[in-house]
Amino acid sequence: MIQLENISKWYGEILLYENLSLTIAEGHRIALIAKNGAGKTTLLNIVAGVESADNGNVTFQNGITVGYLAQEPVLADNLTVLEAIYHADDALVSVVRDYEKALAENDNIRLGELISQMDALNAWDFEHRAKNILTRLKITDFFQKVATLSGGQRKRLALAMVLIESPDVLILDEPTNHLDLEMAQWLEDYLLKSGKTLFMVTHDRYFLDRVCTDIYELDHGILYTYKGGYSDYVEKRAERIEQFNTEVEKAQNLFRRELEWMRRMPQARGHKAKYRKDAFYETKEKAFRKRNDDVIDIQIKASRLGTKIFEADHLNKRFGDKIILNDFSYRFARYEKLGIVGKNGTGKSTFLNIISGDMQPDSGIVEIGESVRFGYYRQTGMSFDENKKVIDAVREIAEVVTLGDGKTITASQFLNHFLFPPEVQYTYIYKLSGGEKRRLYLLTVLMMSPNFLILDEPTNDLDIMTLNILEDYLEKFGGCLIVVSHDRYFMDKVVDHLLVFEGNGKITVFPGNYTQYRNSVEEREEQERRIQEKPVLSKKSVSEKVERERKLTFKEKQEMMSLEQEIEVLEKEKKEMEKAMSSGTLSIDDLTSLSERYGILSADLDEKSMRWLELSEIKS
């Protein structure tokens, strides 16, 4: 479908990639993985034709259509949601728009022309499909102005526009950002059923596992390809790195031997075989290759946490008719790791603002322990003077950072641990990618040594490498943690129980991680579905149903005939024993023996009779 050949791209003085080639084949669903700042979004822009490469070619199969969801989509603010959908340049959208206009103007001549085009494009169900996708993405006010939409709603509208256009190839930059968990699962199913060719960037690892057929990793300017989803990628990447390290070790051993050879008889070096000297320099290059996985140790020393943490007592909060908290009470324990889930608009961020003291409840009491020191990572809280250099912005917070082992490091060393090498530290913040700015923001929150972390959507725009390190840090974090996240993988790793915001002020506690919660919801929904689908049957219909569904097998028929004969023999023997025991002619020993036999016989007869009755209820 799309072929990139020998693509090279510079960003200022930084070379992102050189002579990079890749293929997007029909039906493949490819995810691009790389560290923030490696040029993921730039590569998507090049594929989509939004940006040009410095060198190389991008070739498209003749006649294919491409839809692009940008990381920060640009929309026309003066349009309504429905007008924005009809505003696309896609042929199908254009004919529907023209048809609606001709219909409104009673232009019968134009209508006649457009009807045949509508038939040819199978466009009659377009509006229904458009509204269905918008509703699935929780955009229900179709006449709302785009200018009044929140950032999350704008991203979801842009995603809906791309899906509704139904192009041959979908290019998606972070499609799950601003989707709640239910919407993310719907999108997974939609992409799988659509069979569309897909090229995307996402950090959602469950999404990667379910949707992707291939993973492309951009690592130090080189593109590596892996078949399968995220789990396959992790396994195969580890094998690749192990193989790389083995090759480097072999090259280093060979280099030491060749170095000895090169050093012998310096006066005769000019006479040494040229091919061997060339091989020496090639070996030297291999031996000094470095595998830098940028392992971040961000175990910053947390402030001491006392016994009293946080108590919420009978909290109430509403905005107009919308209830957020309704008589809510909760007491946090030390080292508690709590996840918050719920649909968009149920009040999760409002709850976090009340906990942190940034917002007051309408009624109720909030008590915070004296030793509590909040670190609050907000969805929209990132605020930097972008004309400052990275190092200066960090030094304003602290010149040194105390680590978990009590050692101190400079702000520059700390930045280096956080994937900001010296050459990046002295660049201006406005030059950073969106993900790098998010990583810098996270760094500034953590370096203040909080003992109560509040993370509101921390996974948005962070690369998978940073997420893995952050997850490890949070698992070892010596304080309280509250996380709101739509990243199911992240939630499963870092929290041990959930607060579920169900809307209208209803909040429940679930004692497990997100996957366990989702499984319980699906089980409950399945049970409810079965109850609803189960028909109400009369006694007669139940009997008829049993007769239709159940017949005696040949073996059961044989068993029933045998039981009839055995019961007849046992009943005859039982009557003879009763007659003998009542005759008065038996000795004490004979009477005792006969009584024992009578009990055994009676039990045997009852058992066989019950079995015969069971079989007799089955229609033969």
Image: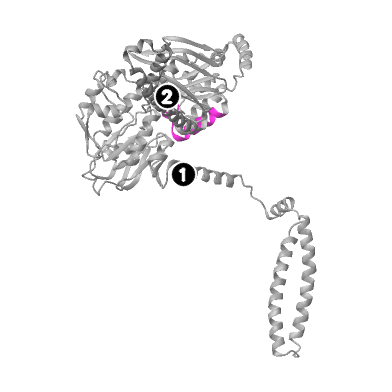
Classify mark 1: residues with Cα within 10 Å, few (<14), some (14-19) or many (20+): some
Asked if residue 435 is positioned above or below residue 54 in the image, the reply reads below
Q: Locate residue 444, reporting x and y percent.
A: 26, 30
Amino acid type of the residue that numbered disc 1 sits on in the rendered structure: Gln
Amino acid under disc 2 = Lys
Left of 309 or right of it: where is 146?
right
**398 on left or right of 512:** left
Residue situated in front as seen by the camera: 334 or 157: 334
Task: Decide if residue 596 is in sight here.
Answer: yes
Give the side of residue 205 with respect to residue 559, left or right.
left
Residue 69 occupies quadrant: top left
> What range is drawn magenta here?
175-192
What secondary structure prevails in the magenta region? helix
Q: Of residues 516 and 147, which is closer to you in this image?
A: 516
Viewer-closest of 74 and 262: 262
Discs 1, 2 touching: Cβ within 8 Å = no
The secondary element bearing badge 1 is classed as: helix
Residue at image position (30%, 33%) is 377
Q: Is residue 617 above or below residue 254?
A: below
Q: Quadrant of residue 343?
A: top left
Can you tell which of label 1 and label 2 is closer to the viewer? Answer: 1
For the N terminus, the image quarter is top right
Q: Check disc 2: other Cα within 10 Å, few if <14, some if 14-19, many if 20+.
A: many
Point out which mark residue 516 bears: 1
Query: Of the residues under marks 1 and 2, which one precedes in the sequence?
Result: 2
In reply to whether residue 216 is colored magenta, the answer given is no
**Residue 381 in sight in this render:** no
The residue drawn where x is 27% and y is 38% is: 356
Give the residue pinned by disc 2.
155
Q: Assign the C terminus to one quadrant of the image.
A: bottom right
